[in-house]
Amino acid sequence: MWPWCGRGAVGSDSRSPVTATRSWDGAAERQVAKKEDLVKAFGTDDQTEICKMILSKGELQVSDKERQTQLEQMFRDIATIVADKCVNPETKRPYTVILIERAMKDIHYSVKPHKSTKQQALEVIRQLKETMQIERAHMRLRFILPAKEGKKLKEKLKPLIKVIENEDFHEQLEIVCLIDPGCFREIDELIQSETKGKGTLEVLSLKDVEEGDEKLE
């Protein structure tokens, strides 16, 4: 049951006038709540008193159906984030949202309503790695480092680099590479601190992906 009431210029004062009162059993269907349901939920069927309770406590009761709808939406949002961020590491092709949703159901992932969808997406990625080929799509970067610090800094950057695609060393060291997006900030801070602002970091692509969607057999 979703109690609802309309009001005029109502502030924090519970004595402010309520211009319209009505309790609805399901906000979407807008069906008037039954008397017995109101008594069960609020201890009274007095519409005005119920509105005062809602206005003073600032809380609404959400029905099981509405709560389930919210959880389903969060489930889809999480799957969308995962599909947007990840690829099959062997083919570099992205997975569709439908495939990610199916994989999440296979591992019996349970949505946590009080945790952000982004945090849960990262959690889902970690869990899916145990059952399928999936990882965050790599970022492609270009470093240009001063010759003096270049070789020494390269050794410090190596553990943070997935693949070095191109390396050129003349008056300065230039590297094109792929990294895990989670390492970007650490790499940027390392280059800036070690070169005292003389090194540069350029993002060539946010996601290194191939055309077409990945399919699960």
Image: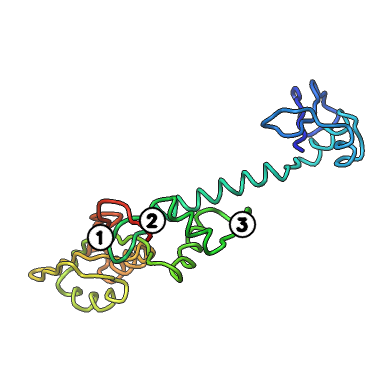
Q: Are marks 3 and 1 in contact (CB under 8 Å)?
A: no
Nearer to me, 88 or 135: 88
Task: Report, in whole angstroms, how far the alpha carbon at label 3 lies from the one at label 2.
Answer: 20 Å
- Label 1 crowding class (10 Å Cα cut-off): few <14, some 14-19, many 20+? many
Identify the secondary structure beneath mark 3.
loop
Task: Report, in whole angstroms, how far the alpha carbon at label 3 lies from the one at label 1.
Answer: 33 Å
Nearer to me, 95 or 192: 95
Where's residue 162, x and y in %? 28, 70
Q: Amino acid at mark 2?
A: Lys
Identify the secondary structure beneath mark 1.
strand
Q: Is residue 64 above or below residue 136?
A: above
Where's residue 51, x and y in %? 82, 32
Q: Are marks 3 and 2 in contact (CB under 8 Å)?
A: no
Query: What is the basis of the colouring in this image?
Result: rainbow
Nearer to me, 106 or 75: 106
Q: Tell me the mark number nearer the camera, choosing from 3 and 1.
A: 3
Where's residue 145, x and y in %? 19, 67
- Residue corresponding to mark 1: 140
Residue at the extreme left of the image, as rendered: 170
Examine the image and state in which quarter residue 155 appears. Answer: bottom left
Where's residue 206, x and y in %? 30, 54
Of label 1 and label 2, which has the lower sequence position? 2
Identify the secondary structure beneath mark 2.
helix
The quarter of the picture where the C terminus appears is bottom left
Q: Is residue 213 above or below residue 177?
A: above
Q: Residue at x 61, y 45 (%)?
A: 70
- Label 2 crowding class (10 Å Cα cut-off): few <14, some 14-19, many 20+? some
Q: Amino acid at mark 1?
A: Arg
Examine the image and state in which quarter residue 130 appears. Answer: bottom left
- Residue corresponding to mark 2: 85
- Residue corresponding to mark 3: 112
Q: Is residue 183 above or below residue 19?
A: below
